[in-house]
Amino acid sequence: MSRPLDGIIVVALEQAVAAPFATRQLADLGAEVLKVERAGEGDFARTYDSAMGGTSSFFVWANRGKQSIALDLKAPEDRATFDQLIVGADVFIQNLSPSAAERMGVLASQLRESRPELIACDISGYGLGGPRTNDKAYDLAIQAEGGAIALTGTPEQANKVGFSIADIASAMYAFSSILAALYRRQATGEGASVEVSMLESLVEWTAAPTYNAVGSGAVPPRSGHRHTMIAPYGLYGLADGTDVLIGVQSNRDWAAFAEHVLQDTALISDPRFKDNPDRIANIRALEAVIDASFMAAPASEILERLRIGKVTHSQVNDPLALWQHEQLRTRDRFMSVTTPTGEAEVYTPPFNISGVDGPDPHVPALGEDTAGLVGRLLARAQTS
């Protein structure tokens, strides 16, 4: 069986995370992706670190399965090559600053003036138009602007989310939008201009607490170890010094937790804890009950009670523990990739589509086109 995007060719003028992570998903599903990099230095994410046997972990993560070409778009000959590559492409994506993209004539609206059938995607920090359009926008800047930092941490200290959540959010909206545009083009033949803003993507992901704040007139307090609007739902200490995450999201869950874990059925109808709003309003009293119960028994016993009561709970893994997770290892969710500096082990993508082979396991060196994609794109352009 063919891969879903076999035959689709993507040209990407991309760097860092947002656009590269979007196009890696396309590559995982069978598209051929040509990564256009700056001559001499390439994507600056190549040198973020050297953790993957000499290659950046960020670059390996976001660029598996692509080909690469190094171009100086200010040089007339290289610019002519780039323009021909666009003519041969099905999809184009870029994440330059809006002003730089406009000066270079690579905004979706500009490219589709001559190629209306093209699916062209712009990713920017704040979106096109508006007072913040040309402000620099890295992941942490958008985490701050988009509400993520204000919602994360303790009452005393706001914290960033520990991974590139704004980049990833925009990447996945670009990916899904391009898939939708390809589906429509298959039916109608029409291309699309896709515009994705990192800010708007993260705003969507922080929408529920924002709606709560607007509706109640109060910003949800940061709670650090637990959910701000559902209880008990968060981290709780055990007698051996470890933590366990408990998830109680319904009154049925609360009844099971009170009976089997706290072993006090009177708590089920206690007016302080009867419904979720009651439990949130009396969270300090609730957590005092939980802490007392958890500290009064060995950790192994509390975990057994959670299992017997079928209460959602999980261990708290750091990245090294996660890498050895028994579920991931049993399901063989790892693959080897070749990089410009050697081999590395990475996760397999979470797409599990029957009859579809795994992704291309190669991370390209700067200017490496082992598949001859540049030549085929240029040949396509000649026949367009």
Image (cartoon, rainbow, N blue to C red):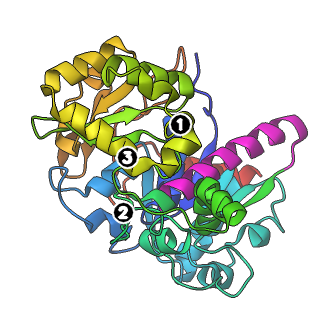
Crowdedness of circle 3 by 10 Å Cα count: few (<14), some, many (20+)? some
Q: Is residue 271 above or below residue 82?
A: above
The residue sitting at 39% across, 57% down in the picture is: 223
Q: Is residue 107 above or below residue 69?
A: below
Residue topped by disc 2: 153
**Mark in the foreground, 1 or 2:** 1
Residue 229: x and y, percent? 53, 49
The residue sitting at 24% across, 31% down in the picture is: 293
Q: Dot 3 lies on which element?
A: helix
Residue 339: x and y, percent? 25, 47
Q: Dot 2 lies on which element?
A: loop
Residue topped by disc 1: 271
Determine the CA span between mark 1 and mark 2: 30 Å
Residue topped by disc 3: 285
Residue 121 found in image quarter: bottom right
Residue situated in front as seen by the camera: 380 or 7: 7
Horizontally, residue 150 falls left or right of residue 191, namely left
